[in-house]
Image (spheres, rainbow, N blue to C red):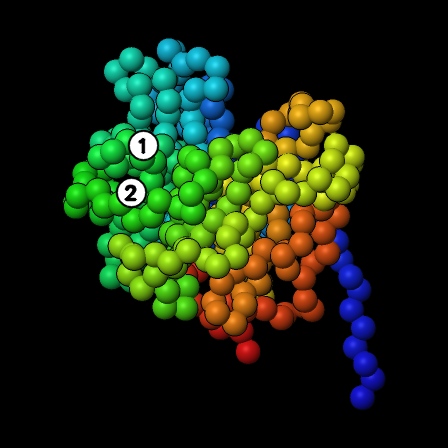
Amino acid sequence: MSERRYQVMNYRNPIIPGFYSDPSLCRVGDDFYLVTSSFEFFPGVPLFHSRDLVNWEQLGHVLDRQSQLPLGECGTSGGVFAPTIREHNGRFYMITTSVGGSRQRPLDNFLVWTDDINGPWSEPIHIDHMGIDPSLFWDTDGRAYYTGTHTDSEGRSCIGQFEIDLSTGAKLSETKIIWYGTGGRCPEGPHMYYIDGKYYLMIAEGGTEYGHMVTLAKGDSVWGPFVSCPHNPILSHRDVVDGFGQEGGPGSFQALGHGDLTCDSSGQWWMVFHGIRPTQGQLHHIGRETMLAPVGWNGEGWPVVNGGKPITAAMPLPGRPGEGRCSAIYISPIIKTVQII
């Protein structure tokens, strides 16, 4: 039998260049949908579509009416922070925070929904929670949960969670602290996943500057307790200096963080995240950009991003065609059941 030969294929980071930070994505069949922050700019929350995670087309914006996104009082670096997009039972949801957009709602957590990804999206459903970076998760029993930043009784930053009624935004449980992170400042950007019988909580820490990182924990319940991954952070360039400020090398990307996970139809897992490209010193011109890296799994059930290697501009596609690992009931983003044989 002749040996099969495979051509090594590369893709290039950033996959969405320019001012597109805090990426979140979901998969429906062979289609991927991705949103990013838009801050004080209108229309809000750019929406992208792809079938291969590398080539993206903008479909438009989720928030395209003033009734959805009042920004009259918004200052620089206010507005829409860190949206999350999810799909459940044929309906798309986008949940986010608007900061300083109006005096009536100076910190406004809300969700919108649509049954057609091309829109229109609903009017906002407001949620009474003082935090940012909300995300949605559906457990195996169909209950929906809001996960976002929180502050404990002593003023310490943490990740909080409560059950939510998505039709009204009402809380169906008390807010419970589920993780403080690994000790980095500003634990934020949480996403919950259910993979191979375990609950995985992934967050950002370290602030959005050069100490930015992605950390992760897992547990046996949506409420925890959550055990920190022994090789946290699972993604960061805080110690990567080789080629700093030079195009293409690992050090040319800094401040990597704020990730979201998905699995493609071949069983390969991926993470989208943002990063910057410094020019000189610690200056950068075009903000945080959306990037992509493959994710593998070790024998203890922990994710390993890009084989533990730094992220570069030219990235090889992992494995051989059709190879991968995606045996899970994966609730968020929505992948019902995928089995790779």
Q: Name the residue under label 2.
A: 160
State the image coordinates of residue 324 (x, y, percent, origin top left): 59, 68
Is residue 308 among what the camera can see? yes
**Residue 93 in picture, x, y percent from top left:** 36, 42
Going 78% across and 35% down the picture, which residue do you hit?
A: 246
- Residue 122 found in image quarter: top left
Q: Mark 1 — residue?
A: 131
Q: Quadrant of the N terminus?
A: bottom right
On residue 112, which mark appears?
Answer: none
Q: Is residue 49 left or right of 280 when viewed as pictured?
A: left
The furthest residue to the right: 2
Q: Give the residue displayed 28% in from the left and 31% down from the top.
A: 155
Answer few, some or many: residues within 10 Å of disc 2's Cα (few below 14, many 20 plus, some between 14 and 19). many
Query: On the rendered structure, is 311 left or right of 135?
Result: right
Q: Measuring from the top left, give residue 297's x and y in whole percent.
A: 54, 65
* Left or right: 200, with 162 as reference point: right
The answer to whether one can see residue 127 in this image is: no
Residue at 31% across, 32% down: 131
Identify the secondary structure beneath mark 1: loop
The answer to whether the residue labelled 2 contacts the one labelled 1, judged by CB atoms less than 8 Å apart, is yes
Q: Residue 114 or 169: which is nearer the viewer?
A: 169
- What type is the residue that disc 2 sits on? Gly
Q: In this view, does 250 lie above or below 220?
A: above
Q: Which amino acid, by three-letter code, is at mark 1?
A: Gly
Q: Residue at x 69, y 29 (%)?
A: 278
